[in-house]
Image (tube, rainbow, N blue to C red):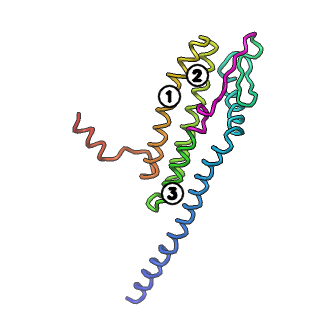
């Protein structure tokens, strides 16, 4: 009887000791994520220049001719006789999409109910989705610009591309919340019951 009591006390002590350590880790990662979001905003000029280089490389895989970048400008169609270019503005950069994801993940880790591993798992899904959607928009804009000129650029940039980015950004935030809460991508049982009733 005494041995059992001591084992339980020891086990309880280990759990109590583990929680503060785990919480400290979550707080450190939260600070890193929130700090990263702030650094992205403060160093947007340098970040956009890097983004332009990456975007130019990816666009070169889908557009005619060669592609390159200079600061925030992307040029496509080099060597074809018709060089086209467009500018990545502060409103079009992936920073605008990545920052909310980083901030949300950082804020979730401030609450003990959210596990560090689950939040990071959700971040690994949400962040590439948000950034990838913006890169896909750039590629679509470049292809439309080459094929249909200014009109194609306007439609793809202001309508099709914007809808794509908005949907993927919303999906990224929702997925982050779902994975951070459940540890996996799943639809809450209450939602399934509600859908079943409507049918």
Mark 1 vs mark 3, CA separation in Å: 29 Å
Figure disc tally: 3
Magenta-colored stretch includes residue 82: yes
Give whichever of discs 1 and 3 has the lower sequence position.
3
Magenta-colored stretch includes residue 138: no
The residue to which callout 1 is attached is: 164
Residue 8 position, x and y percent, is 42, 80
User: Tag 2, which secondary structure?
Assistant: helix
Mark 2 vs mark 3, CA separation in Å: 36 Å
User: Tag 1, which secondary structure?
Assistant: helix
Q: Quadrant of the N terminus?
A: bottom left
Residues tagged 1 and 2 counted as in contact (Cβ below 8 A): yes
Side (left or right) of 81 relative to 9: right
Q: In which quarter of the image is the C terminus?
A: top left
Residues tagged 1 and 3 counted as in contact (Cβ below 8 A): no
Residues tagged 2 and 3 counted as in contact (Cβ below 8 A): no
User: Tag 3, which secondary structure?
Assistant: loop
Question: Would you place residue 3 above or below residue 102 in this image?
Answer: below
- Decide which of 95, 14 is in the foreground and name it: 95
Question: Would you place residue 106 above or below residue 195 in this image?
Answer: below
The residue to which callout 2 is attached is: 140
Magenta residue span = 81-96
Name the image quarter holding residue 65: top right
Residue 30 position, x and y percent, is 56, 56
Name the image quarter holding residue 67: top right
Number of residues whose C-alpha sits closer than 10 Å to that of mark 1, classed few (under 14), some (14–19) or many (20 or more): some
Mark 1 vs mark 2, CA separation in Å: 11 Å
The residue to which callout 3 is attached is: 109
């Amino acid at each position: 009887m005494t041995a059992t009591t001591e084992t339980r006390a020891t086990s309880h002590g280990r759990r109590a000791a583990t929680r503060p350590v785990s919480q400290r880790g979550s707080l450190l990662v939260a600070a890193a994520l929130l700090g990263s979001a702030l650094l992205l905003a403060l160093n947007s000029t340098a970040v956009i220049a890097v983004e332009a280089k990456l975007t130019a490389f990816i666009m070169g895989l889908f557009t005619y001719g060669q592609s390159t970048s200079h600061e925030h400008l992307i040029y496509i169609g080099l060597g074809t006789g018709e060089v086209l270019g467009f500018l990545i503005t502060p409103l079009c950069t992936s920073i605008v999409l990545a920052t909310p994801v980083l901030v949300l993940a950082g804020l979730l880790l401030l609450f003990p109910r959210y596990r560090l591993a689950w939040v990071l798992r959700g971040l690994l899904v949400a962040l590439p989705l948000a950034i990838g959607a913006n890169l896909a928009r750039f590629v679509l804009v470049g292809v439309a610009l080459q094929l249909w000129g200014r009109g194609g650029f306007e439609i793809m940039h202001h309508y099709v591309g914007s809808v794509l980015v908005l949907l993927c950004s919303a999906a990224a935030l929702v997925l982050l919340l779902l994975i951070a809460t459940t540890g996996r991508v799943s639809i809450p049982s209450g939602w399934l019951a509600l859908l079943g009733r409507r049918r």
